[in-house]
Amino acid sequence: MGFGRFWAADTVSLVGSYVTTVALPALAVLTLQASQTEVGLVSAARWLPYLLFGLVAGVLVDRYRRRPLLVGTDLARAVLLALVPLLHVVGLLTIPVLIGIVFVFGALSLVYDAAHQSFLPSLVPADRLTWANARLEQTNAVAQTAGQAAAGWLVKVIGAPLAFLLDAISYLVSGLLLASIEAREQVTQRKPEVREGLLWVYRHETLAPLAITSHVWFLFNSMVATLFPFLVLRTLGFSEFVLGITFAVGGIGGLLGASLSTRAEMRLGTGRAIIVGRWLTPVGYLAIPFATNETTGVILLCVAQFVFGLSIGLDSPIEMTYRQTITPDHLQGRMNATMRSVNRGMIVIGAPLGGMLADALSLRAALWIAIAGLGVQAAAVTATRFRHARLPIP
């Protein structure tokens, strides 16, 4: 019962979030006429709180019950996103204001994410965690497909600012569903320390190489993620609907990857299955720089997003289960916050860096640099002892 409501809340929230995934760059690029560097700054603002406050959030999550944190941050994000169309209507929505809203949203999401990943083990037995994470990833993929396919049409019909209302409503529903869950949570009597979480992540034999290469992956992937909407909407001149379709195809890839994740983990082992996912990202992205403003260009963009989605769907459930399984409960919040804060901190660097490289060199040159970096991280994690990692036997 508890996991079912948790899953339902996640589903509703994700559908709305993927609408914003399309609406935010469309709002910045088309409505507010942002430059490539400004688009990078908007993207970076979303993740800057992870870099600034991530470790503190981990301590917060390990010190208090996680369900109230999930409910509170959901409801606060609903109110915040509802401000976007309101400010647009009264003529006060500018790039600096949008950056501020996105920054506060990111701070709330930081707490939510750390609590979300740490709350699941209290709802699901350890031997069912891979199954549960795979179900969540499949839902993520379906939400991405439906949400972004609809978002492209929705943004075109009602405009990017108004589309934010749908995401606001989704957070409200999610918060109410989470509030109805009854779960027994363990609250540590010890005073959690940031240092303990850092040592656990970066001194662990197999978690450390996974964490470090994840940081590199996020750095270069954020460059591609920042430049992709600019390439589609401005350089190639496609509509918001086409952008939504490409993201939706990525959702289909994610659904397939999540469906294969449990089987891949059993057949290849934890480490090798994750490494396959890491290699799929740069391989899929190779198609992006060759895209043109013709039908073949749309096909190449869809192929790139499909393979990228496949990589995420395959990798994420196994990686999350591995992290949750090897980490003691009293360290869950700090482990998750450490990983996510540094990962998202890399977006703070990578997103504006991608925009600046595109402005200084060219958009396609910046894409090639990012793809090369993703190839390097895949080779690096392949060379470490993580390739031999397996889930602990319960």
Image (cartoon, grey):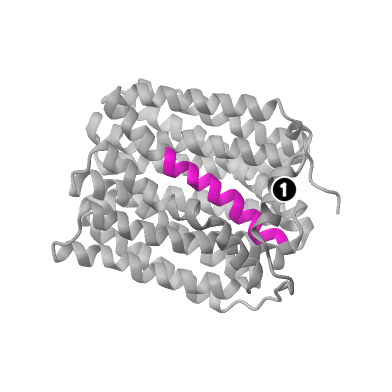
Three-letter amino acid code of the residue under disc 1: Tyr
Residue 369 spot, x, y in % from top left: 43, 23
The answer to whether 2 is drawn above or below residue 132 in the figure is: below
Q: Report the front residue among 130 and 216.
A: 216
In the image, 22 versus 96, the foreground residue is 96
Q: Secondary structure at mark 1?
A: helix
| Residue at x 43% of width, y 51% of height | 48
Magenta-span inclusion, residue 231: no
Horizontal and vertical percent position of residue 75: 43, 73
The residue beneath circle 1 is 322
Residue 345 located left or right of residue 365: right
261 relative to 382, above or below: below
Residue that extends furthest to the right in the rendered view of this protein: 393
Quadrant position of residue 161:
bottom left
In the image: residue 255, left or right of residue 389? left
Span colored in magenta: 331-349
Q: Can residue 124 be seen by looking at this rendering?
A: no
- Look at the image and tell me in which quarter the N terminus lies: bottom right
Q: Is residue 332 magenta?
A: yes
Which residue is rendered at x = 70% and y = 74% of the image?
A: 185
Q: Quadrant of residue 15?
A: bottom left
Is residue 53 depicted above or below 63 in this figure? above
Asked if residue 301 lies left or right of residue 207, the reply is left
Residue at 36% in and 41% down = 245
**Few, some or many residues within 10 Å of mark 1 (<14, 14–19, 20+):** many
List x then y, in percent, for residue 293.
26, 26
Image quadrant containing the C terminus: bottom right
Identify the residue at horizontal 20%, vertical 65% (top origin). 87
Q: Looking at this view, is 163 or 216 the one in front?
A: 216
